Amino acid sequence: GFVCFSFYILDSGDSLKIIVSRDYPELTSNVIINGEGSIYLPILKTVYVKGLTIKELNGILNEAYKEFVKYPEVNSYVISYR
């Protein structure tokens, strides 16, 4: 259910879709968490995400993208689980 999902802990092998902002579709990425627990994103480059929930990831990415994007509205989704 939804509750499990919101507490799901990200780890190597999970595939994510990350939407930074509807105004910047070019920043939308599909990424796989690598063996080191990181993903590679436009502008930010390598971001360590292992051990985070989706909610925590969204918060971190919103903060990080604020330097580059006026109003980031990061939404992350797990496309496929490890």
Image (spheres, grey):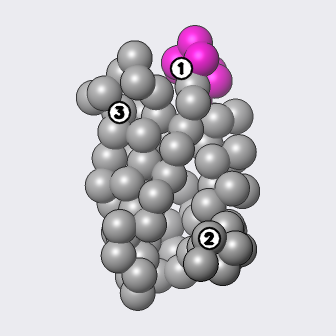
Q: Amino acid at mark 1?
A: Phe
- Location of residue 26 in the rendering, given as x and y in whole percent from the top left corner: 27, 29
- Residue at point 58% right, 12% down? 70
Q: Is residue 35 visible?
A: no
Q: Main secondary structure of the magenta part?
A: loop
The residue labelled by disc 1 is 68
The magenta segment? 65-71
How busy is the neighbourhood of tag 3: few (under 14 within 10 Å), some, or many (20 plus)? some
- Location of residue 24 in the rendering, given as x and y in whole percent from the top left corner: 36, 22
Which of the two marks, 1 or 2, is nearer to us in this view?
2
- Residue at point 44% right, 66% down? 78
**Separation (CA) of disc 1 from disc 2:** 32 Å
- Rendered position, 24 above or below 53: above
Determine whether label 1 and label 2 are within 8 Å by CB: no
- Residue at point 53% right, 20% down? 68
The residue labelled by disc 2 is 2
Q: Identify the image quadrant of the C terminus.
A: bottom left
- Rendered position, 49 above or below 56: below
Q: Amino acid at mark 3?
A: Leu
- Rendered position, 46 above or below 27: below
Q: Amino acid at mark 2?
A: Phe
User: Which is nearer the N-term, disc 3 or disc 2?
Assistant: 2
Q: Identify the image quadrant of the N terminus.
A: bottom right
**In the rendered image, which quarter is residue 63 located in?**
top right
Along the line of sight, which residue is nearer the eye, 67 or 71?
Answer: 71
- Location of residue 15 in the rendering, given as x and y in whole percent from the top left corner: 36, 70
**Separation (CA) of disc 1 from disc 3:** 11 Å
Q: Secondary structure at mark 3?
A: helix
Q: Residue furthest bottom?
A: 82
Q: Is residue 69 visible?
A: yes
The residue labelled by disc 3 is 27
